[in-house]
Image: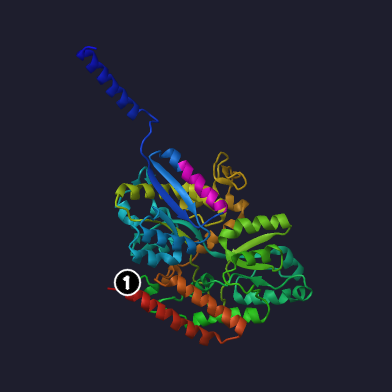
Amino acid sequence: MTKRKFNFLFVLVIIASLLVAIAPGAAQEKTDIEVWIAFVDFRLDWAVDVANKFNEAYPQYNVTIQEYTDYEPLLDAYTLAQEQGNPPEVIQLFEVGTQFALDSGWFRAVSEIVAGREEIGGQAVAFDDIVPVVSGYYTIGGDWSSVPWNTSTPIFYANTNLMEQAGVEAIPTTWQELEAACEQFQPLKEAGTIAGCITWPNHGWFYEQWLAQQNELLVNNGNGREGRPSEVNLTSDASVNIVQFHKDMYDKGYYVYSGVQRDWTGTVQSFSSQQVPFIMTSSASAGGITNSALETGFDVVTSRMVYDGEVGWTGNIIGGATMWITAQDDPAVEEGALAFLLYFNNTENAASWHAASGYVPIRDSAITLLENVAADNDLGWDIDNKTRNALPAGNWFELNPNFRTASDQLGESELTLATAGAVFGTFVETRNIVTQAIEDVMLLGLDPAERLAAAEAEANVLLGEYNQLYVE
């Protein structure tokens, strides 16, 4: 072979190689983004579906979803992963973990990644579209530290068939109206038709809601929003009032307590089996409770969480979780993670997530979309087949009124330091302390003020120890 022919063939090989490299669909190195979430049911399926759609639209990324059974084991696993040096790029963290996340140094604030831009990787940031009560909780000092996803609030569910049997004409809106209604249900209880009047999980989240309704702060320094808090306040008049309400309802046999703290499943089962006419639980259960009632053969309506009518109602706070981005040495990985999260909660996905789960639609644009669902849409979710489908055209909330209650409750809440929610490092531990105190008052007959004083002392010791670790 002559030298000229060899050089010519060599050039052809180089050109062919370059054409393959730049050809559409050519293989390229992907950026892996691992996302850990605390769901193992249809909500996991929905998240995986969205991740797959994102991967199709953005072939430079490979987003995978890892499931955990609840927020606590998820955080434990993430902590271990940090210690071992292999954490995921994104973690779903419940709202009470906000201060810990900020103090840990493990995460990159979303505002830092955004750096004033209006879009990331083709996805609009549009945080001004997030409903105000959600923004109020997850912005600290005006900055976004994480990206919202699943947001809920407690609402009131009523079995209207049992109400009719008892002669109760109106759904209670206050503690006082609830007690009066419960008295009317006593004959059904004595006849063995029902086990009691109402149930809800003994969980600190409900206590926190009733504090916010009374515009009372859980910790000092503006609920931790005007400075790092140094004191937990569990002995206020509002706090004692809440625990006394638990005791009164339990002592009268109105409140059905399973004896298991944080018993979300058991309380819903009591309501779904018509053992109680009323339940207060998360708005995220609206779909499941409503569908179960239809299958069983009774009607359910929802309304706002009851409040103390002698004090008044300021508003409710949110629950749920946001998505936090692990700090990376490579800014491109952080940007890819944020691009996914912005896609994950864009208008269409926020609307679909609400319709699939019952969690509050976190964007104003998602609420508008649901109020005007077009005939050709991809907003529904088929649980059995694990695929998107179409919602009925029209106003979703008019067709499904039980799904509107949570948005109305949060939208009508006054934005105060109390309804913004507390932020402090030992929130998880304090919530458990409060839950135990409430159980002790109900089951052991302890004085609410005295038991709360002991709980407050315990909570403040923990907060003091925590602050010593993070306050310079």
Q: Secondary structure at mark 1?
A: helix
Res. 66 visible in picture: yes
Q: Residue at x 52, y 85 (%)?
A: 451
Name the outermost residue toward the right. Answer: 191
Q: Residue at x 54, y 81 (%)?
A: 241
Q: In this rendering, would 381 be left or right of 90? A: right
Above or below for 291 versus 198: above
Q: In this rendering, would 203 be left or right of 271? A: left
Above or below for 427 versus 454: above
Spot occupied by residue 239 in the image (x, y as percentages of width and height): 50, 80
Spot occupied by residue 435 in the image (x, y as percentages of width and height): 53, 75
Does the stretch in magenta take in 50? yes
Nearest the viewer among 268 and 421 is 268
Q: Magenta segment, which residues? A: 41-53
Q: Which residue is mark 1?
A: 470
Above or below for 401 versus 201: above
Does the stretch in magenta take in 330? no
> What's the residue type where badge 1 is placed?
Tyr
Spot occupied by residue 350 in the image (x, y as percentages of width and height): 49, 50
Name the outermost residue toward the top. Answer: 2
What predominant SS class does the magenta segment belong to?
helix
- Tally the marks: 1
Q: Residues within 10 Å of mark 1 (few under 14, many from 20)?
A: few
Above or below for 354 versus 247: above
Q: On the rendered image, what quadrant is the N terminus found in?
A: top left
Q: Residue at x 60, y 48 (%)?
A: 383
